[in-house]
Image (cartoon, helix red, strand yellow):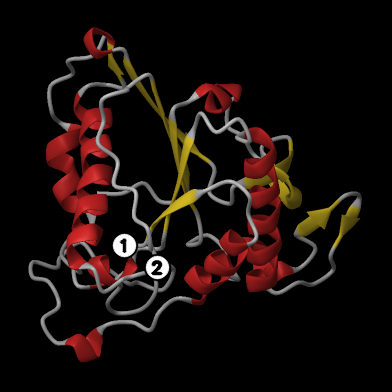
């Protein structure tokens, strides 16, 4: 139901109900978590079925794939470095949005970042070797500074969605692991994952920000739903009629 490592920007939809939680870190509040989850589901459905535009309601929804939230450097079509000190905006339209939802984390792993060897860059310096979690922390701090600078006007509501567990069986994604054949959620809580370090790092970075960021901490709730991967069930939505303009 969710876009991984992305920015979702919604413009000119003034009547949407947004759950503003006084204590968004309270993961024990099931009602609040479900409300936030349903809000993201609503945006996703509108995006897939309405083809991003609903002119009758002055609504415009955009999806920008920026897996790391910071800028990737290319040599031709080949990715060579990740700039930890420069945000990848996707488009300048983000600055004019009423609501923006950010998400990252799954791509900050050794296999997806060349083991951290000569990959992470800051300024003109390329780190010969760097741990992916340290890089994730630096990238989030860059993003946080950009948020404080870009949305200091207070007109845009900023959201950040936490990690959703991957639920691979038979190995990880690059070693034969599968997740699309699951048909039931997890009933035994002993099979749930530990709270991700990625979430704790974001929570620490968020505490130092000036701009209020609504934390969509869906990790524990989606941990139960090993049957909820969109690779299979999402086909129904992808084949839905296009009512856009």
Element marked by disc 1: loop
How many labels sit on residues? 2
Left or right: 195 with respect to 27?
right
Picture coordinates of residue 146, whole percent (x, y)? 68, 42
Estimate how packed mark 2 is, as few (under 14), some (14 to 19) or many (20 or more) residues with alpha carbons within 10 Å. Answer: few
The quadrant in which residue 16 appears is top left
Which residue in the rendered view is the most extreme toward the right?
124
Q: Residue at x 66, y 65 (%)?
A: 137
**Disc 1 marks which residue?**
218
Answer with mark 2 or mark 1, whichever residue precedes in sequence: 2
Disc 1 crowd rating (10 Å Cα; few below 14, some 14-19, many 20+) is some
Using residue 184 as the reference point, say whether residue 34 is left or right of it.
right
In this view, the residue in front, 54 or 179, is 54
The numbered dot on residue 25 is 2
The answer to whether residue 122 is above or below residue 61 is below
Asked if residue 36 lies left or right of residue 66, the reply is: left
Instruction: Look at the numbered disc 2 and give the secondary structure of its residue.
Output: loop
Residue shown at the point (31%, 71%) measured from the top left: 27
Residue 186 appears at what percent x and percent y?
A: 15, 77
In terms of depth relative to the viewer, which is nearer, 165 or 238?
Answer: 165
What numbered label is drawn on residue 60? Answer: none
What residue appears at the point 73 percent right and 34 percent down from the top-left corner? 76
Q: Quadrant of residue 120?
A: bottom right
Give me the C-alpha separation between circle 2 and circle 1: 11 Å
Comparing 62 with 229, the one in front is 62
* Image coordinates for residue 70, horizontal then vertical, percent: 65, 47
Q: Where is residue 43 in the image (x, y as percent from the top left)?
A: 27, 36
Residue at 20 percent across and 35 percent down: it is 45
């Amino acid at each position: 139901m969710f876009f991984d490592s992305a920015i979702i920007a919604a413009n000119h939809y003034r009547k949407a109900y947004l759950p503003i939680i006084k204590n968004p870190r309270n993961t024990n509040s099931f009602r609040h978590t479900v409300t936030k989850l349903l809000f993201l589901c609503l945006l996703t459905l509108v995006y897939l079925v309405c083809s991003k535009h609903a002119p009758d309601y002055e609504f415009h929804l955009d999806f920008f794939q920026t897996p790391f939230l910071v800028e990737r450097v290319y040599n031709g079509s080949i990715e060579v470095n990740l700039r930890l000190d420069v945000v990848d905006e996707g488009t300048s339209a983000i600055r004019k949005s009423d609501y923006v939802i950010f998400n990252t984390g799954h791509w900050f792993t050794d296999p997806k970042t060349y083991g951290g060897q000569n990959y992470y860059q800051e300024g003109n310096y390329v780190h010969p070797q760097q741990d992916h979690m340290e890089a994730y922390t630096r990238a989030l701090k860059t993003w946080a500074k950009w948020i404080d600078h870009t949305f200091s006007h207070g007109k845009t509501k900023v959201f950040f969605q936490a990690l959703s567990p991957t639920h691979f069986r038979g190995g990880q994604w690059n070693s034969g692991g599968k997740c699309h054949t699951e048909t039931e959620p997890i009933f035994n809580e002993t099979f749930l994952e530990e709270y991700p370090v990625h979430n704790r790092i974001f929570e620490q970075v968020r505490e130092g920000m000036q701009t209020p960021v609504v934390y969509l901490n869906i990790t524990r709730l989606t941990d139960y739903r090993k049957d909820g991967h969109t690779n299979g069930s999402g086909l129904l939505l992808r084949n839905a009629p296009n009512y856009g303009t």
